[in-house]
Image: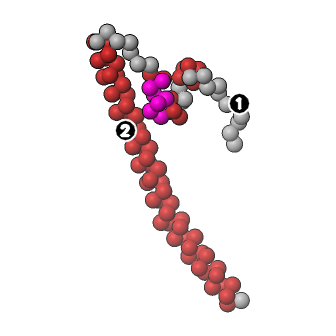
Amino acid sequence: MRKYLCVMVIAVFCISMYSTACAPVLIGAIAYKSSKNKKARQDFTKSFNANNTDREAKDLEPLDWCVEASRFDRQWALKDKDCRKQLGVKPSTKRRK
């Protein structure tokens, strides 16, 4: 009985430490990653626009947004329905739970 009680106390302690210490760290890491991705996407967009402006000044064809965005971050590019169509990706018919 004493052994069972000791195991339960240790389990409760570990669970309480996990929920109070790790959860905020995980949430902070997710928020940091999200803001990092947003900044990277903004930088990509600025660079893409500057590059296309430069190409047009040199009488070159502009780069395609969907192709270049897909090379940068495919999941981000596929959020745009026009890019999905252009890249030949059909929308999923499966429902997510």
| Above or below, 73 relative to 12 | above
> Which amino acid type is marked by label 1?
Thr
In the rendering, at what x and y percent does residue 71 appear? Answer: 47, 30
Q: Which residue is mark 1?
A: 93
Residue 92 in sight here? yes
Q: Which mark is residue 39?
A: 2
Q: Quadrant of residue 63?
A: top left
Q: Secondary structure at mark 2?
A: helix
Crowding near the residue tagged with mark 1, few <14, some 14–19, many ≥20 C-alpha atoms within 10 Å: few
Q: Give the magenta-colored segment's residue range.
A: 67-73
Crowding near the residue tagged with mark 2, few <14, some 14–19, many ≥20 C-alpha atoms within 10 Å: few
Seen in the image, is 45 located left or right of residue 1? Answer: left
How far apart in space, not on screen, are marks 2 and 1 (Cα)?
A: 32 Å
| Above or below, 96 relative to 25 | above
* 50 falls in the magenta region: no
Which residue: 32% across, 16% down?
55
N-term-proximal mark, 2 vs 1: 2
In the rendering, at what x and y percent does residue 54 appear? Answer: 29, 18
Which residue: 34% across, 12% down?
60
Which residue: 44% across, 53% down?
29
Pointers 2 and 1 in contact (C-beta within 8 Å): no
Q: Nearer the viewer, residue 66 or 32?
A: 66
Q: Nearer the viewer, residue 10 or 63?
A: 63
> Which amino acid type is marked by label 2?
Lys
